[in-house]
Image (tube, rainbow, N blue to C red):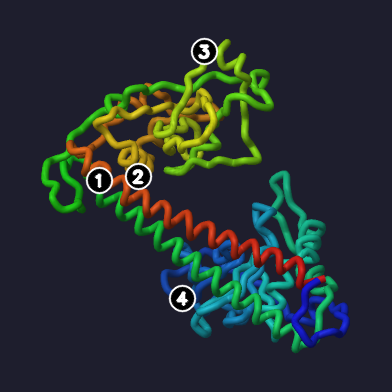
Amino acid sequence: EIRFLGFNDPWEQRKFNKLAETQRGLTYKPSDVCENGVRVLRSSNINEDTFVIDKDDVFVKKSAVNVPFVRNGDILITSANGSSHLVGKHAIIRQIDNNSAVIGGFMLLATTKNPYFLNAAMGSSWYKKFINLSVAGGNGAIGNLNKNELDEKTLFVPSNDEQGKIGQYFESIDTIITLHQRKLEKLKTFKKAMLDKMFPKNGEHVPEIRFSGFTDPWEQRKLNSLCEIFSDGDWIESKDQSSKGIRLVQTGNVGITEFLDKPDNKKWISDETFKRLNCKEIYAGDILISRLPEPAGRACIVPKINEIMITAVDCTIARIAKEFSNKFLVQYLSSSEYFGKVNTLLAGGTRQRISRTILGEFEISIPTIIEEQELIGVFLGELDNLITLHQRKLEKLQNIKKSMLNKMFI
């Protein structure tokens, strides 16, 4: 549908093995594994469609290696996996030292003159259809991509010059996407570090980092003591729902410090049901805490929406008293220490949850001065906004790439 200027020749059909040489990976014994040796690349080295060095990579003795070493520009392909949906995922190997790595037995390696073109082609519709039809698996069986079937698969390709242009284009997109992913990960890491440093550790009364001018020790308070209202939402069954009326906010609308509006999945109840069930209205500024995974205990502040709203029974409504900051509290409810506590207190069968009573008894360290609470909440909230901004930019880039993959290949 879309081509670069100057290219008009029709594309030709070629077998995959005419475009790339594929190789199977290394089979090794447990006795071959060592701490420092030759890195074995596996499915975990492909994150989405990006090559990564994994912290849990396996190394084997050099004497155990009987397959070629990988090179930068080779395409790494998952050929077998217990999760069938991971079979066929692929990425170009980048920034790896010569003679330092091989692929594992459940992987394939494709070597080609135009890796960025072929890797992009493997992100388009022909490859997805091929994987869906060819990969066996399910019901406990390991999903498997047959090397010979991939070699014999035909696809449409342009001239070498046009392949080069297309490859350069997708290399540029991948580079920009990788940069945004790194920025996003750095921001998330920084936010996590700030959460750890701006709240006191167990047994301590002051945090490691504070805003200047505040020296008073923090106090311990139970979560429910910070609230004017601390109660669960309403029990609303499917039969109670309506096509319009009062907005029903559910656990799926509760993200970690973020209200997820989900415009295509809104729920309502009628005015009559609202009155009949004597439902509790929620307001902008209330904190909603999801008692269900994933993760249980996540919380967000209700935004200002021009709708009357209620919430479901598996959400706890925390209406914070005026002398405390909801911005501070919602940040505490996103900390790793808090989630660690929640995970030890889940109960139930197949659908575990944390009870409102247990949540209410949580001991929280909090500054005695609301101005300090607000400063902490606003600062960490701004980090959340930056993270959301970069996440949206990344998603836009990924959507552009997806669209171009559909339009630039046959």
Q: Which of marks 1 and 3 is in front?
A: 3
Q: Nearer the viewer, residue 398 or 122?
A: 398
Q: Name the residue under label 1.
A: 199
In the rendered structure, are the residues bearing label 2 and label 1 in contact, judged by CB atoms less than 8 Å apart?
A: yes
The dot on residue 335 is: 2
Please identify the residue farthest to the top as the structure is shown. Answer: 276
Q: Distance between the residues labelled 4 and 1?
A: 42 Å
Name the residue rendered at 57%, 10% in the picture.
Answer: 276
What is the secondary structure assignment of the residue under circle 2? Answer: loop
Label 3 Cα crowd, 10 Å radius (few <14 / some 14-19 / many 20+): few
Q: Name the residue under label 4.
A: 37
Q: Where is residue 293 in the image (x, y as percent from the top left)?
A: 50, 36
Q: Distance between the residues labelled 1 and 3?
A: 39 Å
Give amino acid for label 1.
Answer: Phe
Whether residue 17 sits left or right of residue 103 in the image: it is right
Q: Which of marks 4 and 3 is nearer the N terminus?
A: 4
Q: Name the residue under label 3.
A: 278
Label 4 Cα crowd, 10 Å radius (few <14 / some 14-19 / many 20+): some
Q: Which of 261 and 250 is in front in this view?
A: 261
Q: In this view, does 73 lie above or below 270?
A: below
Q: Nearer the viewer, residue 130 or 362?
A: 362
Q: In this view, does 164 lie above or below 178?
A: below
